[in-house]
Image: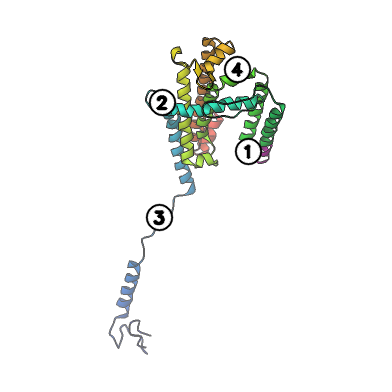
Amino acid sequence: MRCPKCQFDHELQTTECLKCGIVFARYQAALDGAALAGLSVPVAPPPPASVAVRDDARRELKYRILALPLALLVARLVAGTGFRIAAGMLAMVLHESGHAITAWLTGRWAVPLLWVTPHGQERSWYIVLALAAAIIFGGFKAWKAQRWRWVVAAGAVLTLQLIALCLPAGALIVFFGDGGAMVLATILMATFYAPRESALYKNWGLRWGLLAIGALSFMHVFLLWSGPYEDLPFGEIEGVNLSDPSLLTEMYGWSVIQMVDRYVHLGELCLVALSGLYLWGLVSAYLEIVPSSEKQRILANR
């Protein structure tokens, strides 16, 4: 055999080297120990995918328990501080967007700006047909892609357009300044419950940002109309026109009580819709946590 240290070739099978004197068994044990000492500590394998998914589901359940109530509570507190001016600016963007969207649905052109939304006085059937075609095309594309939520949304918007075409456009456009702001703010808050595979869910900043903007804007407008009458913005906006409350009462003949009740009822309807979405979000997040057997039992008892 050949000595592992000095490479001297032994003709006889000996237990030690006849040249350098090492004991073969001890020398090999020392080599094995040095090799083991040089190995890195084995890394624990990652947890199974099912465990990671369940942990994510538990975290999402906590978010859904706290996010919407806390957003509305903080927005209510902000409404009583100097930061309400910032909330008012956010609400103004949704306010003018509400005017514009309502005008489009009634077949009128509109350009939303910061403090005013110029719009046409006469209905244009070109606008009506163009908007209807865009909605139908969007619904068709969603149907082909089997995105059923967007198919339902397209159907809802088309139905809304048909209803808007049957109502008095002038008062409707004015009312859905603040009314549209509350509806759009509700939609922004509802995006918090977007599906997991959507870009809204995956983008943390966008998801929570839209929730905050929606809550601040909604609370700013809702508190205005559920508060004292003397806080309502009657009068004329310099360089623009009469304010929305003055237009509704002086031009369209609404009483103050009638106008306030309609705004408050619309806000309450938005809160009811958010409450239903909140409960659905809790149930759906909880069902992602429970085992499959337990989930089947729960669904069977419904």
Residue at the spot of label 1 = 147
**Residue at x 46%, y 19% (from the top left corner):** 224
Frontmost of labels 3 and 4 is: 4
Residue at the spot of label 2 = 84
Q: Mark 1 or mark 3: which comes first in sequence?
A: 3
| Residue 249 image-quadrant placement | top right
Label 4: which secondary element: helix
Looking at the rendered structure, the kind of residue marked 4 is Ala
Q: Please state the horizontal and vertical placement of residue 246, each as a whole percent of the image.
A: 53, 14
Label 3: which secondary element: loop
Q: Say left or right for 19 vs 103.
A: left
Judged from this view, the residue extending furthest toward the bottom is 11
Frontmost of labels 1 and 3 is: 1
> What secondary structure characterizes most of the magenta part?
helix
**Residue 261 falls inside the magenta stretch:** no
**Residue at x 39%, y 57% (from the top left corner):** 43
The front one of 184 and 57 is: 184
Q: Mark 4 or mark 2: which comes first in sequence?
A: 2
Find residue 44 and name its label.
3
Label 2: which secondary element: helix
Find residue 43 and name its label.
none
Q: Mark 2 or mark 3: which comes first in sequence?
A: 3
Distance (Cα) linking label 1 and label 2? 38 Å
Distance (Cα) linking label 4 and label 2? 28 Å
Q: Say left or right for 78 vs 271.
A: left
How crowded is the residue under tag 2: few (<14 C-alpha within 10 Å), some, or many (20+)? Answer: some
Q: In the image, which residues are magenta?
A: 140-148
Judged from this view, the residue extending furthest toward the left is 21
Label 1: which secondary element: loop
Residue at the spot of label 4 = 171
Distance (Cα) linking label 2 and label 3? 52 Å
Q: Please state the horizontal and vertical placement of residue 67, each as a whole percent of the image.
A: 44, 32
